[in-house]
Image (spheres, rainbow, N blue to C red):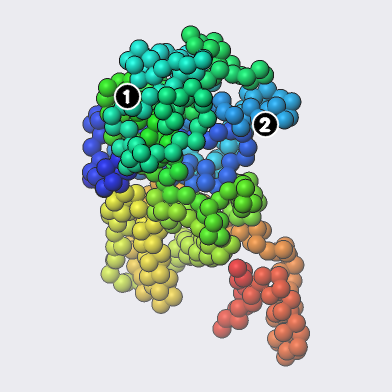
C-alpha cells in the first residue's frame, strides 16, 4: 500500500482515496510572467511522477495543474513592455510547455487558467460573504480568519505568531486576506457585485480545484514555500465554503538552493530551465531531480551536475553493453527483483532516491558479470524486461543508449568525431613507431579537449573526461 507524508498531520499515512480506485489531485502551477526556473521544473517533475505512479498502481487519476495568469507581476511586465497582460501570460505559458516537454513532463488532465474561471470565482466569493466568512470594504472582499476556527492547522502556527505582508487598509485583522480587489486604471478587470476588479491570489486555486475536482480532493501538492500563507488560506476558504475537509493529503516538495543559498532573482543565482538545458542534457536535469527525495531541498551546483553526467554516461554505457551481449554462459539464472524493490520504495512516500540507488547497485553487479563472462542470457533478458518497465515510469534511461551517448559527446566535447578518430590513428602510429614524445603530445592535446585515451590489451579506445 502507498504511504504518503502528510504535511497536515505531520506524519506518514497509508493512502486511502476518497473513492476507491480513483485519485483527485491538484498542484499549484506557475505565474507566467517570465521563463520557468528550475524550481518550477522540479515541482512539475515531482507531481507528474506521483501521478504516473498512481496510474501504474492501477488508479484512475484526475490531475489538475494551474496557471496563475492574472497577477501583479504579469500586469507590471505588460505595462513596461506596452503589451496586454494576456499576451505576456500566453507567451510564457507556451514557453513552459516547451520546457516541460523536453523534461518529459506530461500535461495534466486539465491545465487550468485563472482567467477562465472568473465567473466561478465571483460565485464562490459570494457564498463566503453569505456565510459570513468574508466581508466587503471599499470594493474589496476580505476573508476573516477569526471566523475560521481551525486557521493555522496546516502550518502549525499560532494566531499571535502570524505575519501577513499582504497590504490592505480595509482589513479588520491584519492577517485577514483579500479575495477580490478593485483594479487600477489600465489593469485587467471584471465586473462583480463589489467592484470592477480581479481575484486575490489564494481564492484562485480553491475555485479551480472545486471546478474540476469537486469540493473534496485526495491530494494537494506544491512547494514547501507555499504552506503559509497560500495553502493555509486555501484550506480556510475551501472548508468555509463547503463545510467539508478540502484535501485529505497535503504533499510538499523541497526547495532549490544554488551553491548553498536559496535560489532568488535578488541574489543573482537564478537558473531558468532554458539556461539549464543549454548546459545540460534534459535527462541529466531529470536525474538530478529524481535522485533526491521529493520533499528534501536540492543544492544545485556544478559538482552535482558533473556527478550526474558521469552517472548517466555510466548507466547508458552499461545499457548499451546489455543490449549487445553475445550468448551468455551456463551460469544459473539470477533475479535482481528490481520491480519488487521499485514498488517497495515508491510505496514508501515515492522514494525515487532509493529506486535509483538500487538500479546503480544492480548495474555494478551486472558489469562484474559482463567483465567475467559469467552470466546467463535469461538473467540479462529478465532484468532488461523489468528495467524497461521501471524506467518507463521514471522516464529515465529509456532513450536509445547510442543516441544518448552521441548527444552527450556533442554536449561535452568541443571536437567532432572525425577529428577524434584521426587523432587516435596518429596515436596508434606514434606508438608503433615508438615516438613517445608524439604519443605524449597527442594524449595531452586530447586531454585539453576533455578526452582520455585508454590503452587496452587489444585496442585503443577513448573516454570523455567530465
Q: 277 or 231, which is in the foreground? A: 231
Q: 429 or 299, which is in the foreground? A: 299
Q: Is residue 320 visible?
A: no
Q: Quadrant of residue 85?
A: top right
Question: Which residue, given by chain and number where applicable, does mark 2 sit on?
Answer: 77
Q: Which mark is residue 412?
A: none
Where 71 sits versus 460, above or below?
above
Q: Is residue 185 visible?
A: yes
Residue 457: give x, y in percent of width and height. 56, 83
Tell me the quarter of the image containing the C terminus: bottom right
Residue drawn where x is 42% and y is 45% of the image: 224
Residue drawn where x is 66% and y is 17% of the image: 185
Calculate the distance from the C-alpha at mark 2 to the C-alpha at mark 1. 36 Å
Residue 37: give x, y in percent of width and height. 57, 44
Q: Quadrant of residue 359?
A: bottom left
Residue 55: give x, y in percent of width and height. 34, 38
Residue drawn where x is 48% and y is 62% of the image: 315
**Badge 1 density bin: few <14, some 14–19, many ≥20, Cα 10 Å:** some
**Badge 2 density bin: few <14, some 14–19, many ≥20, Cα 10 Å:** some
Question: Which residue, given by chain and number where applicable, does mark 1 sit on?
Answer: 147
**Mark 2, mark 1: which one is toward the viewer?**
1
Amino acid at each position: 500500500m502507498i504511504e504518503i507524508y502528510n504535511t497536515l498531520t505531520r506524519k506518514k499515512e497509508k493512502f486511502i482515496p476518497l473513492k476507491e480506485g480513483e485519485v483527485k489531485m491538484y498542484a499549484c502551477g506557475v505565474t507566467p510572467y517570465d521563463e520557468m526556473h528550475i524550481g518550477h521544473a522540479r515541482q512539475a517533475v515531482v507531481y507528474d511522477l506521483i501521478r504516473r505512479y498512481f496510474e501504474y498502481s492501477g488508479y484512475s487519476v484526475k490531475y489538475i495543474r494551474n496557471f496563475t495568469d492574472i497577477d501583479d507581476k504579469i500586469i507590471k511586465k505588460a505595462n513596461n513592455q506596452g503589451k496586454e497582460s494576456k499576451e505576456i501570460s500566453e507567451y510564457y505559458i507556451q514557453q513552459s510547455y516547451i520546457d516541460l516537454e523536453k523534461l518529459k513532463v506530461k500535461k495534466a488532465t486539465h491545465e487550468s487558467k485563472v482567467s477562465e474561471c472568473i465567473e466561478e470565482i465571483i460565485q464562490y466569493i459570494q457564498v463566503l460573504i453569505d456565510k459570513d466568512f468574508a466581508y466587503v470594504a471599499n470594493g474589496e472582499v476580505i476573508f476573516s480568519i477569526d471566523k475560521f476556527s481551525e486557521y493555522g492547522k496546516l502550518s502549525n502556527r499560532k494566531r499571535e505568531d502570524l505575519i501577513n505582508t499582504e497590504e490592505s487598509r480595509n482589513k479588520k485583522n491584519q492577517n485577514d486576506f483579500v479575495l477580490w480587489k478593485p483594479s487600477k486604471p489600465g489593469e485587467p478587470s471584471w465586473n462583480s457585485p463589489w467592484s470592477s476588479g480581479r481575484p486575490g491570489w489564494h481564492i484562485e486555486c480553491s475555485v479551480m480545484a472545486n471546478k474540476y475536482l469537486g469540493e473534496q480532493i485526495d491530494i494537494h501538492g506544491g512547494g514547501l514555500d507555499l504552506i503559509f500563507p497560500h495553502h493555509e488560506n486555501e484550506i480556510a476558504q475551501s472548508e468555509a465554503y463547503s463545510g467539508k475537509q478540502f484535501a485529505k493529503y497535503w504533499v510538499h516538495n523541497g526547495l532549490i538552493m544554488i551553491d548553498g543559498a536559496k535560489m532568488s532573482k535578488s541574489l543573482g543565482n537564478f537558473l531558468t530551465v532554458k539556461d539549464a538545458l543549454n548546459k545540460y542534457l534534459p535527462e541529466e536535469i531529470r536525474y538530478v531531480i529524481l535522485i533526491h527525495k521529493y520533499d528534501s531541498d536540492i543544492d544545485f551546483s556544478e559538482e552535482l551536475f558533473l556527478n550526474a553526467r558521469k552517472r548517466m554516461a555510466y548507466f547508458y554505457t552499461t545499457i548499451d553493453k546489455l543490449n549487445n551481449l553475445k550468448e551468455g554462459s551456463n551460469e544459473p539464472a539470477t533475479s535482481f527483483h528490481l520491480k519488487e524493490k521499485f514498488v517497495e520504495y515508491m510505496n514508501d512516500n515515492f522514494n525515487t532516491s532509493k529506486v535509483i540507488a538500487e538500479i546503480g547497485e544492480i548495474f555494478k553487479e551486472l558489469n562484474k558479470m559482463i567483465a567475467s563472462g559469467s552470466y546467463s542470457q535469461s538473467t540479462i533478458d529478465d532484468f532488461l524486461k523489468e528495467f524497461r518497465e521501471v524506467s518507463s515510469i521514471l522516464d529515465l534511461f529509456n532513450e536509445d543508449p547510442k543516441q544518448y551517448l552521441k548527444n552527450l559527446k556533442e554536449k561535452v566535447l568541443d571536437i567532432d568525431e572525425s577529428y577524434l578518430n584521426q587523432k587516435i590513428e596518429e596515436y596508434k602510429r606514434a606508438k608503433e613507431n615508438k615516438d613517445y614524445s608524439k604519443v605524449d603530445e597527442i594524449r595531452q592535446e586530447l586531454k585539453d579537449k576533455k578526452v582520455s585515451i585508454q590503452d587496452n590489451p587489444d585496442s585503443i579506445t577513448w573516454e570523455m573526461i567530465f
